[in-house]
Amino acid sequence: MTIIDGKAISEQIKQEIATEVAEIVAAGGKRPHLAAILVGHDGGSETYVANKVKACRVCGFTSTLIRYEADVTEDELLAGIRQLNQDADVDGFIVQLPLPRHLSEQKVIETIDYRKDVDGFHPINVGRMAIGLPCYVSATPNGILELLKRYEIATSGKKCVVLGRSNIVGKPMATLMMQKTYPGDATVTVCHSHSADLVKECREADILIAAMGQPNFVKADMVKEGAVVIDVGTTRVPDASRKSGFKLTGDVLFEEVAPHCSYITPVPGGVGPMTIVSLMKNTLLAGKKAIYP
Ligand code: GUN
């Protein structure tokens, strides 16, 4: 059994990006610039955005953090997005989700110029991904593909089960695993809260990707011997023994499942660090105008 080291791979990729940025700048090119909009003061979002800004520094990118209070009006926020769409120095930007309930996430996403949508959430990027055209692919699925690649895990003809059907992980993950590429060419099943026999489906998976956000949901009896298990879960479970007051907990009961796997991602240190690196890769592509010249 191999524990997939997302932390180590992510550090390696950030160094690769930093090297390329240094070369671009040395040749007189523009330093890539990522902007992030953060609305309110949600603890999880604060941490994610701070980590994104930190990763920008490591990669040699310029970064700008734009804050709005939680009671910002939708019009104000959309005006801020339109301003970034017009700002020639900003290559790509994100609006950290979730947003306060009075703001429409869909409206926000669709207001972002798809050519600067380094989150890959805009319908144009989602649609282009679905039909295999160059686009910004959303961070978590792209990070998982990168891990499969770096560990040379075979996917062609394999049975891949995706647990969860969210727009930002489950759906794009399933779409990518069925593409005519590597990693891909898998036979994909998507399971969710209405699936008739989820345990049976999971037991048949060569590659099991758990992304439903239910801590410790996947038990040993749901995993085929020798399966590849990718854990996308990052639920903050209260834990009084920790300084933070919580324990980041995956969707897979690691201790029980790991002995049955060929490969497994831990939480933390598996998919999580790769997500930010995917955003950095998209920002580099945006800086180079590689996808939308
Ligand atoms: N919230 C959770 N994941 C993400 C992400 O990948 N991008 C943004 N913008 N918000 C998120």
Image (cartoon, rainbow, N blue to C red):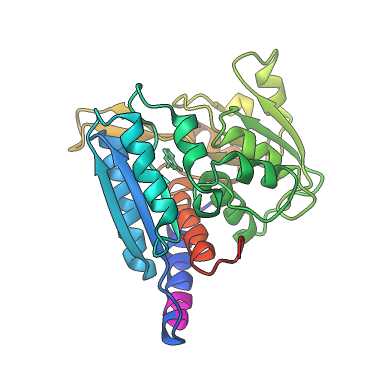
**Count of number-bearing discs:** 0
Q: Is residue 31 left or right of residue 154?
A: left
Query: Going by the picture, which residue comes out furthest to the bottom?
Result: 27
Residue at (36% x, 71% y) in the render = 60
Say above or below: 37 vs 286.
Answer: above
Which residue occupies the foreground of this view, 223 or 9? 9
Which residue occupies the foreground of this view, 43 or 288? 288
Do we see residue 225 in this rendering? yes
Do we see residue 262 in this rendering? no
Q: Point out residue 105 in the picture as x, y percentages from the top left corner.
A: 44, 30
- Magenta range is 19-24
Q: Point out residue 41 in the picture as x, y percentages from the top left corner.
A: 23, 35
Residue 214 lies in the magenta stretch: no
Say above or below: 95 vs 63.
Answer: above
Residue at (20% x, 32% y) in the render = 241
Q: Is residue 59 left or right of residue 134?
A: left
Residue 22 lies in the magenta stretch: yes
Q: Is residue 129 left or right of residue 55?
A: right
Say above or below: 153 vs 99.
Answer: below
Q: Is residue 201 left or right of residue 139?
A: right
Q: Main secondary structure of the magenta part?
A: helix
Residue at (40% x, 72% y) in the render = 31
Q: Quadrant of residue 124?
A: top right
